[in-house]
Image (tube, rainbow, N blue to C red):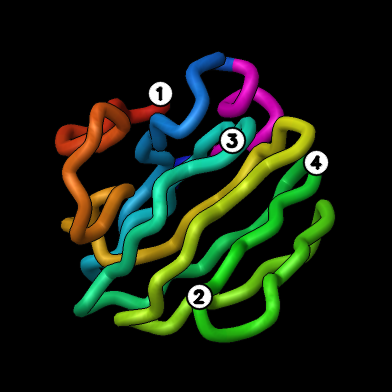
Amino acid sequence: METVSLTEAFDSFDETWSPRLAGELNGQAVKLAKADGEFVWHQHEAADELFLVNAGRLRIEFRDEADAVLEAGEFTIVPRGTEHRPVAEPEAEILLFEPSETRNTGDVETDETVSDLERID
């Protein structure tokens, strides 16, 4: 069995908005990402998405409802089909839990779209 140290995993990369694969189970991926500033507005039509803040602060903006503000140790689940935009000010370390095939930019193709995730060793 593999044990993952979140501290070591987050220390292993510096890029922001470029998730890394930390593990997989039952068709779901555990992804780690560093976030800084605004990401793109997007949605995931077929997948719920869990955001857990490991360090820092993350605000998730929604078009039709109040923002979710997450501090370290807190999480929220964005329901499938909900347009959202993560914003980190200052930088945040986040853990994402979602189906393995879920793209970070959902239904939007941008320079920040990551199709092939780098695995954290």
For mark 1, give the secondary structure.
loop
Q: Amino acid at mark 2?
A: Arg
Q: Earlier in the sequence, mark 3 or mark 4?
A: 3
Horizontal side, residue 115 vs residue 48: left or right: left
For mark 4, give the secondary structure.
loop
Q: Earlier in the sequence, mark 4 or mark 2?
A: 4
Q: Amino acid at mark 3?
A: Ala
Residue at 70 percent across and 29 percent down: it is 7
Q: Are marks 1 and 2 in contact (CB under 8 Å)?
A: no
Q: CA distance from mark 2 to mark 3?
A: 20 Å
Q: CA distance from mark 4 to mark 2?
A: 23 Å
Horizontal side, residue 58 vs residue 37: left or right: right
The residue singled out by tag 3 in the image is 35
Residue 96 bears which disc, if any? none
The residue singled out by tag 2 in the image is 63
The quadrant in which residue 74 appears is bottom right
Could you tell me residue 73's position as x and y percent?
80, 59
Q: Are marks 2 and 3 in contact (CB under 8 Å)?
A: no
Of all residues, the one furthest to the front in this rendering is 63
Residue 56 bears which disc, if any? 4
The residue singled out by tag 1 in the image is 121
Q: Amino acid at mark 1?
A: Asp
Horizontal side, residue 81 vs residue 38: left or right: left
Could you tell me residue 63's position as x and y percent?
50, 75
Q: Give the extent of the magenta segment.
A: 4-11
